[in-house]
Structures are given as C-alpha cells and as structure tokens.
C-alpha cells in the first residue's frame, strides 16, 4: 500500500510575481511559433510589458498584505516584505528593459528574446525569495541560464556570441563554487533552510566548524561572481561590452538587485553566528571592488566598458552596506539599489540610443556634443552620471550617505574614508562623460552619419522614467526609507 | 512644515523651480533672458523683505522653516537666517546674481535656456548654503553649487576651460568629500544633523574635515591651484559670482559651522589658519602685482582678500569678525564689478592683457569713472567701506599678535600698488595696440548693471556700521579655562 503523496500547501499569492512572468514566458514562446512574423515583435513586447506590470502590481499587493514575514512551501521560500520590495524593483527594471528593447529591429528571434527577459526576471524574483540552499541554487541557475542565452542572442555578431560564452563559462564556475559551498554547509549542519542552518549552528555550537566556514566562504565567492564584485569581476567588462546593449541594461540593474539582496538575506538569516568573519570578508571584497572598479574605469574609452567598471565600483558601495550587518545597513542597501538600478538601466538606454544612431560602439569621443543635439537623452545621461558620482540632488547621493552612515555606525571609519576616496576618484570619469556631452568645442562635434535618427518614443519614455526615479528618490527619500525599514524588519 | 520662515524657503525654491521651468517648458528664446532676470530681481525683493523682518538686536535664528526629512538619522529640511551675517551674505548673493544674470543677458549668451537655468539654479543653491540649518542640507546645497558652476565654466568659458573645470572640480570635491565624512561623523555622534540642536563637538578631526572644504573653496594658500585658471577661463559674470559670492560661502562656513560647533578646535588651530591666511594675503598681493592681465589681478587679489577676511574671522573677537563680514560684502561687490568690467574691456578689445591695453580713459568717461571709483574703494582709501572693513580686521587681529597686523598693513600697501597698476595700465599710459576707436564706452545697459553695485559701495562707505554693527549676537569662541587639545583629539574615533 502506498500512502497518498502529501502535497504541501502552496501559497500561490506569494509566488504570483514570478509565476506571472513565467506565464509570460510561455505566452511569448507560443507567439514565437503561432503569431505571424509581422506582428510578433509588437505582440511579444506588449505581453511582456503587461506581465511586468502585473507582476509589479502583485508585488505591491504582496507588500501591502504581508505585515509579518512567514516561510511558505515547506519553509523553502519566504513570503515577506523584503521579497516583495525586491520584486517591485525587479518588475520596474524589467518594464523599462522592454521599453528600451522595443526599437531593436534587426533582431531575429524577437519573441524568444522577450520570453527570456521575463524568465530571467522571474528567476531573480525567485532567488530573492529563497529560504533554502536548494531554492537559492534553483533561482540562481534559472536567471543565469536565461541571461547566458540573452547575451548571445544576436548570434550573427561574433561579440555577442563571445559574451554569451564567456558569461556561461565563468558564471557556470561561479555557480559550481556556490553549489559546492552549499553542499559543505549542508554537510556541516544537516539543514537546507536558512533559519534551520542558523538554529543548527547555535544548537551544536558549530561556529568554528571548518566545513561550515569553508562552505560559507564558497557561498560568498559564488554570490560575488553574480554581483560582479572584485576579485570575481573578470567577466563583467567583456560581457557588458559584448552583449546587446538592451540586455546589458537589464542585466546591470537587475542582477545586482537580485544577487545583493540575496547575499544580505542569506548572511543575516543563515549565518548570524559567523558575523565576525563574513562582515570583514565582505568589507575586504568591497574595498577590492572599489579599487578595481574605479581605477580601471579611469582609462576606459568605450562607454559600455566604463559603465561596467562603474557597476563593479557600485557593487563595492553596496557591499559596504551589507558588511555593516545592521538594520541601517539593510536599509542603506535597499535604498541604494533603487536609484542605482534606475541610473544603470537608464545610462545603458542612452548608450543604446546613441549606438543605434551612430551604428557603431559608443565611446567618450563620439559622445561629443550629444547633450546639445539630443537634449532629453543628454540631460538624462547627465543626471545618471551625477547619481553614480553621488552628487545631489540625486538618489545616488543619499544612497552613499546611508552606506557611509551604516559603515560608521558599525565603527568602521576606515571604510568610510576609503569609500570617500573612491568617490573622489570616480568623479573624474563620471565628469568625463558629462564633459563629452556638453563641454566639447563644437568644432569637434561628430554628427551621426545618417542625420536624424528614427524617433524612439518608448526608449525616451523609459529613460525619463529612470530620471524621475533617480531624482524622485532624493526628494521622496523618507517614504522609500520607510519601505526599506519594514522590508528589513520582515526578514 | 513648522516655523514662520516662508520667506527663506521661497528664496531657495523660487530660483530652483524657475530653473527647472526654463529647462523643461518650451518657450520662445527671447523670453528666457527677461524671465530669468525677473526671477533674480524678485529674489532681491524677497531679500529686502527679509532684511526688514530680521530683528538684528535679537539676533539668533529667525525666519525659521523646518520639516523632518530623514527621520531615522535625524536629518531635516531646516532653513532660516542665523545671525545678521547670513542676512548680509544672502543679500550679497541676490544682488550679485541679479547683476550677473543681467550681464549675461546683455552679452547675449547662446543656448539661453540652459544658461539661465543654470544661473538660477546656482542662485538657489547659494542662498541655500547661507540659510541651511542642517549639516546634511548645508552639504547638499554646497555640492549643488558645484554642478552649475562646472557646466557654466565648461560650456561658456574661454579656450582653456576644459582643464580649468577639471582642476576646479577635483580640488573642490576632495575638500567637500572630507566635509561629507565630517558631517556623517558629527551627525551620528550627536544623533541629529541639526546645527541648532547638535551642540558643540570637541573633536579636532571633524573640524579639520570641515576646514578642508572651506580652505579649498575660499581658497587659502596653498590650496589655490584651481583659482587662476577658473577665474580666467570663466565667462566674466561667472567669475564675478565665483569670486564675489561662492568664495564667501567658505568664509561663511568657518563662521557658521566651525565657530558655533567646534569652538575648542577653532582655538586649537587658530594659529595655523592665521598663518596660512597671512601668507595667502601677501602672496596673493604679490602675484596680483605681477599678473599680466586684468582678470589675473582680480583673481589673485581675491586670494589676498580672502586671506584678509579669514584673518579677521580667526581673530576670534567681535572687532575682527565684524570687520570680516563687512569686508566679505565689500569684496563681493568690488570683485563682481571688476570682473564685469574686465569682461566689458575684453569684449571691446578681445584681450585683457595689459601690454595691449592702455589709454582707454580718453573718450570713455563712464568706463573710466566706474573703474576708478571701484578701484579706489578696492585699495581701501580712508573713508571707503573697504578701509573700514580692513581697519576693523587689523585692529581685531592685532589682539592675536602684532605680527598679523603688520602683515595686513603691508598687504594694504601692496593692494594700493596692484590696483593702481591695473588702473593705469587700462585707462592711462599710451594707447594700447588692441584699443581701437570702435571700442566704445560703457553702454547705458552696462552702466545700469554696474551703477547699483557701485552705489551700494558708496552707501556703505558713508555708513559701514550698517553692516558691521549688525553682524552677530553670538560670542566668538574663546579658549576654555582648562583647554587640552590632547583629550579633544582623542575623542574622535
């Protein structure tokens, strides 16, 4: 006699943000086969945009209806405001990514592109929701595999293929390290769930267990690969440069959100006893990222590479917030991510627009005069650079302020000083971009070969939305901080 | 929002909102300049209203406006006029900015929407610096000054502008970021970023963080590397703002933040800063005497005058501080007029170099009169407002040591030398190669911009006590009975 299989109760609402996107993936794949060629692009983009909006709404409702965090699905996933806020950010990023991608006309497999975009975002949401090592790995691979294909989706172009392959090999290595680390932690504690690990460590007094600590170190390394923190960043500039710009835009913003939020969650909930070790480890990784990102960015001419190094340096700032291991640090991390994600996807959107206009790679040189030629995109790029550089009135300034406050609150004045030195260095290359946009003598201006570019209203709308977020997050900082505070409290 | 200081908030927000409107709302190009000028004149009007409302006998914080902003860290939007000196500096800002906007309009700057928007944004930011009562807010306005200046110099400046902007930004940002660290440390230690409630702090390190920003922005010797390039390559009216108003933000910072929050550190570092200021005073005067062009003279004389002002502030007695604040207003007006005159001369002759100028007084009475009147005030002839200011500063700093007063007196002689050299090189001597008959006298519009500034200088010459007796009701920092710098430094982490 075989007993009926016990099915666990499923909290569909908690899964809804990622399930909606999964549904979109399926729909887009059907469109790829069933819809006529002419309407494929519009149909797939519309369905995906609707999916991101639906996912956004579901996440907002989830935030509203979940005052207290609970574990669902046999404790493997969390339903809490932390996840809901992450899903809100990711859905918004995805929606902007659709707007940025729409004008990309040359692409062959356009419906599959949107399917993968939705699938990647769904995987990221799933990752930030994970409450067990198994689910973490599942979410990580889910979005990573989608991104590998997305990077290589322009397979007619050698560089796109190269980017996809590089990302696949190095990302696969990172995943393997993470998986190995998870196995060691499981071996040491016998638990898969995050809170279970913490309880097991406390019960059996395992803080100094070599197996556990090796596992923890490998998990940090694996997540470091995904967050593109130095010294695990080698893939970042090449992949960001080679991948189609609309993919880079999505990847640079969304991957950071997912990877860093999960890092904070797993470290705080699963490894509170090893706090003394991982805070220092993360601080060191943060300093490495700041150093590598900022110094390498100084000499970049290609704008996508410059932004790639800038994203490494930003990962450093966010890791400072994680390493503070406090409620203030969590708040700082979530707050920082909002203007960062907007500025990042927005900056790549501007690059994409310029790239389509020029028909070649965007460098500091051929950006010259863009601020006067294309006032909206130019002013937007200016705002994003100011936000990256941490100048008011942008959210990037308050983000840095919170990060430094969190580090000081922990007693790490040295980290504050290093962060400030890094900010001073970063000014040089961010201002270099602004200089190219506005200050070059008009004799040096290089106008686009094809004259007026095709109008791309959707991309402009997406960019303006990013500007609104970047500046709005400065003025409406308190409500956002309140959201973040509640999110961190629900962990 | 609490407090009755709607006028303070209005003075900050009006130009900022107007700037955004100019950038975003499409309008005919010819409207842009007059609209910006109108807004900047409204600013002057609001300031006059604030001047009338401010009760100088009571002093302290008035026209206060407050709203909580980041409640978890104790950051608030808190603005108001703190002591008489902030009223005077806001007045200087509004008047010089109005003159500069008018001057830009007269010069017909291209890309007007961007240009006037940036000028108005700058106005709002500077007024914000002078009225912020929260350290983070102060920092935000402080940084917000930098962004429009960067583009104004970089996009409308002279041929060497790219290097000038990079130097300017890197210098000032390094100073500012040290200030940010100091702001964070101070705010988290005190539990609030309010300058009113935060109380004093004994840490020398925090003081040094603030002092770094102010020393670079002023600038004091030896941190003036950005100054000659920035002042030479900017459009004339932006130079006027930089040297007339923005440099005063640094002196204001010493007075408002360092003196009231770090009195013990001010006493500890008084000698160092006095020595730097004295060196800058003499060095700047000598360089001004050697400078080959009008802007060089005015730029280096700014370095010297800021040295003198800081000398007066760090006399840390009422006489010196009163003189310093009067001198801030004097120098702000004088250098604004001189830079705009330099721009006017450059526009007519395409050069500011003395070897190509000369003999411009003949047939150009208005130019000669304005330059002569301003120059004579600048060199502090007895009876001028600059004389009153410098006399008070020297008398004040004499109490810190006769040496400083002697240095100051020497520098006043040097000032007479470089100003007279400039006047004679431009107005008198043989007719220069660049001076042709087509180089006209000042136009009525230019006179209308400059005459009010000169008139204020003449008014102050008649009644310097209007400012110098309405500076502050607070006591200057003094050495505590048992001051020990060692323990104070140990308090900082």
Image (spheres, rainbow, N blue to C red):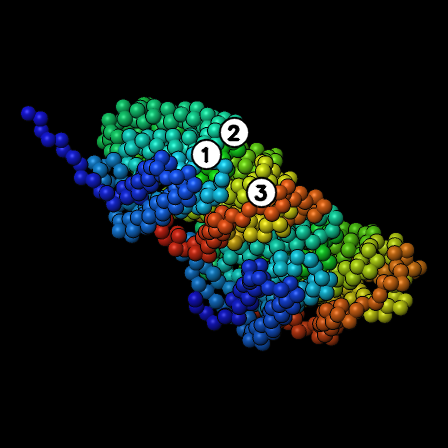
Whichever of labels 1 and 2 marks the residue nearer the N terminus, that label is 1
Residue B238, given in percent of the width and then of the height, sits at 69, 58
Question: Which residue of the protein is positioned furthest toward the left in this rendering?
Answer: A1
> Is residue B20 shown left or right of residue B323?
left
In the picture, the quarter occupied by the C terminus of chain A is: top left
Q: Is residue A364 above or below residue A211?
A: below
Of all chains, the one bearing label 2 is: A
Q: Which residue is mark 1?
A: A108
The image quarter in which residue B249 lies = bottom right
Q: Are marks 1 and 2 on the same chain?
A: yes
Q: Earlier in the sequence, mark 3 or mark 1?
A: 1
Count of numbered labels shown in the rendering: 3
Left or right: residue A134 versus residue B461 is: left
Between residue A191 and residue B463, name the one nearer to us. A191
Residue A234 visible in the picture: no
User: Which residue carries the number 2 mark?
Assistant: A157
| Mark 1, other Cα within 10 Å: few <14 / some 14–19 / many ≥20 | some
Position of residue B32 measured from the top left corner of the image (x, y, whole percent): 63, 64
Numbered disc 1: secondary structure: loop
Q: Chain of mark 3?
A: A
Q: Position of residue A309 (x, y in %)?
A: 53, 35
| Mark 1 or mark 2, whichever is nearer to me | 1
Residue hosting label 3: A357
Based on the displayed image, in which of its 4 quarters is residue B416 positioned?
A: bottom right
User: Numbered disc 1: what chain?
Assistant: A
Tell me which residue sits at (55%, 41%) in the image: A356
How far apart marks 3 and 1 lie (CA) works out to: 20 Å
- For image coordinates 53% across by 68% down, the residue present is B10
- Along the line of sight, which residue is nearer the eye, A346 or A49? A49
Percent of width and height locating residue B260: 54, 59
């Amino acid at each position: 006699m075989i007993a009926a299989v016990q099915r666990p109760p499923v909290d569909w609402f908690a899964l809804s943000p990622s399930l909606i996107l999964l549904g979109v993936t399926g729909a887009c794949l059907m469109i790829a086969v069933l819809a006529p060629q002419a309407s494929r692009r519009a149909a797939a983009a519309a369905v995906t945009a609707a999916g991101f909006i639906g996912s956004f709404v579901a996440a907002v409702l989830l935030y509203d209806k979940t005052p207290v965090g609970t574990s669902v699905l046999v404790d493997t996933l969390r339903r809490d405001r932390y996840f809901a806020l992450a899903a809100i950010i990711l859905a918004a990023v995805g929606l902007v990514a659709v707007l940025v991608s729409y004008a990309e006309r040359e692409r062959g497999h356009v419906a599959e592109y949107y399917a993968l975009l939705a699938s990647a975002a769904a995987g990221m949401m799933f990752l930030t929701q994970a409450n067990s090592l198994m689910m973490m790995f599942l979410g990580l691979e889910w979005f990573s595999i989608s991104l590998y294909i997305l990077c290589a989706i322009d397979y007619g172009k050698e560089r796109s293929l190269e980017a996809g392959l590089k990302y696949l090999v190095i990302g696969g290595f990172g995943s393997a390290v993470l998986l190995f680390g998870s196995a060691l932690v499981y071996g040491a504690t016998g638990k898969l769930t995050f809170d279970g690990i913490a309880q097991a460590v406390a019960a059996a007094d395992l803080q100094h267990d070599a197996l556990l600590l090796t596992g923890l170190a490998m998990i940090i390394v694996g997540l470091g690969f995904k967050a593109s923190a130095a010294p695990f960043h080698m893939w970042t500039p090449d992949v960001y440069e080679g991948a189609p710009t609309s993919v880079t835009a999505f990847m640079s913003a969304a991957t950071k959100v997912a990877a860093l939020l999960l890092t904070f969650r797993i470290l705080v909930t699963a490894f509170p006893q090893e706090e003394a070790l991982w805070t220092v480890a993360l601080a060191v990784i943060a300093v490495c990222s700041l150093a590598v990102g900022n110094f390498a960015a100084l000499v970049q001419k290609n704008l996508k590479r410059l932004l790639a190094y800038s994203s490494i340096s930003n990962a450093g700032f966010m890791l400072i917030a994680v390493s503070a291991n406090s409620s203030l640090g969590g708040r700082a991390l979530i707050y920082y991510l909002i203007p960062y994600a907007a500025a990042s996807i927005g900056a790549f959107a501007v690059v994409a627009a310029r790239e389509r206009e020029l028909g070649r790679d965007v460098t500091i040189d051929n950006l010259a005069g863009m601020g006067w030629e294309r006032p909206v995109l130019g002013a937007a790029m200016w705002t994003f650079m100011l936000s990256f550089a941490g100048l008011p009135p942008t959210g990037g300034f308050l983000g840095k302020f919170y990060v430094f406050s969190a580090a000081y609150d922990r007693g790490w004045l040295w980290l504050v000083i290093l962060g400030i030195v890094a900010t001073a260095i970063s000014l040089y290359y961010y201002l270099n971009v602004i200089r190219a946009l506005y200050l070059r003598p008009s004799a040096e201006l290089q106008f686009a070969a094809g004259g007026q570019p095709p109008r791309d209203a959707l991309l402009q709308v997406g960019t303006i939305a990013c500007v609104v977020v970047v500046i709005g997050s400065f003025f409406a900082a308190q409500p956002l901080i309140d959201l973040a505070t509640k999110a961190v409290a629900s962990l | 929002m609490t407090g009755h200081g709607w006028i303070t908030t209005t003075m900050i927000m009006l130009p900022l909102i107007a700037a955004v409107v100019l950038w975003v709302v499409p309008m005919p190009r010819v409207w842009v300049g007059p609209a910006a000028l109108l807004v900047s004149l409204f600013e002057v009007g609001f300031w006059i209203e604030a001047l009338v409302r401010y009760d100088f006998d009571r002093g302290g914080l008035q026209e206060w406006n407050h709203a909580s902003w980041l409640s978890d860290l104790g950051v608030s939007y808190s603005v108001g006029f703190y002591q008489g000196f902030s009223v005077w500096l806001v007045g200087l800002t509004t008047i010089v900015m109005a003159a500069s906007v008018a001057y830009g309009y007269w010069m017909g700057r291209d890309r007007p929407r961007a240009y006037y928007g940036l000028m108005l944004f700058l106005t709002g930011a500077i007024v914000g610096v002078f009225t912020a009562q929260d350290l983070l807010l102060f920092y935000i306005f402080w940084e917000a000054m930098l962004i429009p200046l960067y583009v104004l110099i970089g996009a409308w400046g002279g041929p060497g502008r790219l290097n000038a902007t990079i130097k300017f930004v890197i210098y000032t940002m390094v100073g500012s970021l040290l200030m940010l660290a100091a702001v964070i440390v101070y705010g988290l230690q005190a539990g609030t970023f309010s300058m009113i409630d935060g109380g004093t702090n004994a840490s020398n390190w925090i003081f040094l963080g603030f002092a770094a920003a102010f020393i670079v922005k002023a600038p004091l010797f030896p941190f003036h590397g950005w100054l000659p390039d920035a002042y030479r390559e900017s459009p004339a009216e932006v130079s006027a703002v930089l040297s007339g108003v923005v440099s005063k933000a640094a002196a204001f910072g010493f007075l408002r933040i360092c003196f009231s929050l770090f009195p013990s550190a001010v006493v500890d570092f008084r000698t160092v800063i006095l020595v730097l200021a004295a060196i800058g005073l003499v060095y700047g005067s000598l360089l001004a005497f050697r400078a080959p062009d009008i802007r060089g003279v005015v730029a280096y004389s700014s370095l010297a005058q800021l040295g003198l002002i800081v000398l007066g502030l760090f006399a840390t007695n009422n006489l010196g501080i009163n003189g310093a604040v009067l001198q801030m207003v004097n120098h702000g007006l004088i250098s604004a007029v001189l830079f705009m005159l330099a721009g006017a001369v450059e526009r007519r002759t395409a050069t500011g170099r003395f070897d190509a100028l000369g003999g411009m007084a003949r047939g150009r009475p208005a130019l000669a009169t304005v330059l002569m009147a301003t120059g004579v005030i600048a060199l502090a002839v007895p009876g001028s407002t600059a004389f009153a200011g410098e006399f008070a500063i020297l008398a004040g700093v004499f109490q810190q040591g006769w040496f400083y007063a002697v240095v100051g007196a020497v520098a006043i002689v040097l000032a007479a030398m470089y100003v007279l050299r400039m006047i004679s090189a431009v107005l008198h001597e043989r007719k220069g190669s660049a001076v042709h008959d087509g180089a006209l006298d000042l136009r009525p519009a230019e006179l209308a911009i400059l005459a009010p500034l000169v008139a204020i200088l003449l008014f102050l010459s008649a009644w310097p006590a209007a400012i110098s007796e309405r500076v502050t009701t607070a006591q200057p920092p003094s050495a505590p009975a048992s001051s020990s710098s060692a323990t104070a430094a140990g308090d900082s982490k």
